[in-house]
Image (spheres, rainbow, N blue to C red):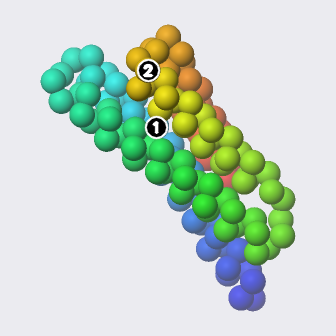
């Protein structure tokens, strides 16, 4: 019984981590719009980038915690790690001001994050 409760708690933490990641990516899209239309948009987008990156790291941690003790499939860890790589590329592209790749990658990341959320 304790094992099932632990598994549900880990599953919940993983689901929360994916939800937070999805929301932060969506908020990045909103702040990108503000970046184009207001003076404080750049600050919001910059802070949001850090939060989104942290959410991607939280997703990796949650996936590892859900996988390791139970000995289940490492697939969520691979997905989360891939997302962290995409987030790293996204940050580099944003700093380098390459919107022709930065924007479509952001849309792709949001879609993949929604897909990961729907699978949970």
Q: Is residue 109 above or below residue 9?
A: above
Query: Mark 1, residues whose alpha carbon is within 10 Å: few (<14), some, or many (≥20)?
Result: many
Which of the 4 image quarters holds residue 30? top left
Q: Is residue 62 above or below residue 57?
A: below
Which one is closest to the eye, mark 2 or mark 1?
Answer: 2
Q: Position of residue 28 (x, y in %)?
A: 39, 33
User: What residue is shown with label 1?
Assistant: 25
Instruction: Look at 24% across and 34% down and name the residue there.
Output: 43
Which of the 4 image quarters holds residue 7? bottom right
User: What residue is shown with label 2?
Assistant: 96
Instruction: Look at 62% across and 74% down and name the residue there.
Output: 9
The mark found on residue 90 in the picture is none
Q: Secondary structure at mark 1?
A: helix
Between residues 120 and 32, which one lies in front from this camera angle?
Answer: 32
Q: Secondary structure at mark 2?
A: loop
Task: Please identify the quadrant where the N terminus is shown.
Answer: bottom right
Q: Is residue 67 above or below residue 31?
A: below
Instruction: Give the left or right position of residue 95, taking residue 84 as reference.
Output: left
Name the N-terminal-most of marks 2 and 1: 1
Is residue 107 visible in the rendered image? The answer is no
């Amino acid at each position: 019984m304790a094992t099932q409760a632990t598994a549900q708690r880990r599953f919940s933490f993983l689901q929360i981590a994916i939800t937070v990641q999805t929301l932060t990516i969506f908020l990045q899209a909103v702040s990108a719009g503000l970046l184009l239309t207001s003076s404080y948009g750049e600050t919001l987008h910059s802070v949001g980038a850090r939060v989104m990156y942290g959410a991607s790291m939280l997703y990796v941690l949650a996936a590892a915690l859900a996988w390791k003790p139970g000995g289940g499939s490492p697939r969520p860890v691979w997905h989360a790690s891939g997302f962290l790589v995409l987030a790293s590329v996204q940050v580099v592209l944003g700093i380098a001001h390459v919107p022709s790749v930065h924007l479509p990658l952001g849309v792709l990341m949001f879609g993949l994050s929604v897909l990961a959320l729907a699978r949970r």
